[in-house]
Image (tube, rainbow, N blue to C red):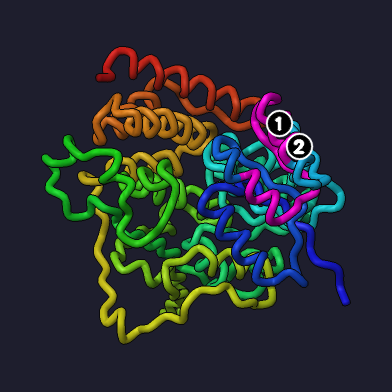
Amino acid sequence: MTMPQQVTVLGATGSIGLSTLDVIARHPQRYQVFALTGFSRLAELEALCLRFKPRYAVVPQSSAAQALQSALQVAGLATRVLVGEAGLCEVASHPEVDAVMAAIVGAAGLPPTLAAVEAGKKVLLANKEALVMSGALFMQAVRRSGAVLLPIDSEHNAIFQCLPGDYARGLAPVGVRRILLTASGGPFRQTPLEELQRVTPEQACAHPNWSMGRKISVDSASMMNKGLELIEACWLFAAKPAQVEVVIHPQSVIHSLVDYVDGSVLAQLGNPDMRTPISHALAWPERIDSGVAPLDLFAVARLDFQAPDEQRFPCLRLARQVAEIGGTAPAVLNAANEIAVQAFLERRIRFPQIASIIEDVLNLEPAVEVESLDSVLLADASARAYAEQWLQRNGR
């Protein structure tokens, strides 16, 4: 009998982290939780530690670590609580860890995700920003270390499943003409353009098909999420931006497609539940039960498709431009977007101003070649500073 795989879950209290733990709990003979990390939902992290009894837990501050350590000791757990980025990197790269779910949202997920890659782990990549920011550096580290990189975004996981077997063995896909990224269109797909000035964070976070965190929900509403996925797809699948096409598909049943030069188009379908790509990546190249109900095509009844309107979704246009520019431009785009989305959630700006901030910051921060992680982090910091200055001048 083989030993259970040891799994670190970065971002355990978020929607992806919780879905991952749900799949793990269904297969206790196959998987064991090695470490759990959390940022702000520390009561939820404590409850998860009590349930899964990890070797380690990681929190952002020393005071929170002391409180959690005391609570777990009272409960009789031997879990060791670590602090900050150093703790995240330690549990991501620990010699006893087999797989790492990289589900920390935003730029904060880059250091531990890269640490897992450099340690040669099986990395389940849900943190698209890590790859968007560091691009070539990230993929070079994957090849150098021998890490196994498996995409968790439903779209990229679908593409992975539709590509030839040679791709999964590290070889470039042959005969692929286009990658078709599907998008639901979010909650504002049909909202009159003039009404977008008045939409609220609550409306932006009310996704019609998926249950997600607030930041990624706003990204979906602006279609920046799809723009980041476009950039990510270029790196994951060695594609040029012109080869990646976004298709609005409101039902969220087809998760993406691959178009081959012989005219074949392969698609991956399923109910909109993140446990499907998570279970696929955890067990790859095998298949395990995810807990997701079978797809009922008769209930779905129809599948609709339309081209995205870049007047309605300017963030998608900006992301495609950045994908063509390369260098540090994706890091600048991502940083400006993170600041802008947070400002919108705090009601400091209107929804259309998210794209305005990003475009202005891109014009202020010229892209340079990525030579090291330091150059990426410098561009990230500079873009955040420009975005904050924009808010001071123009915010409500």
Residue 382 among magenta residues: no
User: Badge 2 is on which residue?
Assistant: 81
Q: Position of residue 224 (x, y in %)?
A: 38, 44
Q: Position of residue 262 (x, y in %)?
A: 45, 80
Rate crowding at label 1 as few (under 14), some (14 to 19) or many (20 or more) other CA atoms within 10 Å.
many
Vertical arrangement, residue 379 with respect to residue 313, above or below: above
Circle 2: element type: strand
Residue at 41 percent of width and 64 percent of height: 180
Q: Which mark is residue 65?
A: 1
- Predominant SS along the magenta part: helix
Bounds of the magenta segment: 45-71
User: Does residue 19 appear to the left or right of 148 in the view shown?
Assistant: left
Quadrant showing the C terminus: top left
Q: Are marks 2 and 1 in contact (CB under 8 Å)?
A: yes
The residue closer to the viewer here, 107 or 396, is: 396
Q: Position of residue 18 (x, y in %)?
A: 57, 55
Precedes in sequence: disc 2 or disc 1: 1
Residue at 46 percent of width and 66 percent of height: 273
Can you tell which quarter of the image residue 359 is in? top left
Rate crowding at label 2 as few (under 14), some (14 to 19) or many (20 or more) other CA atoms within 10 Å.
many
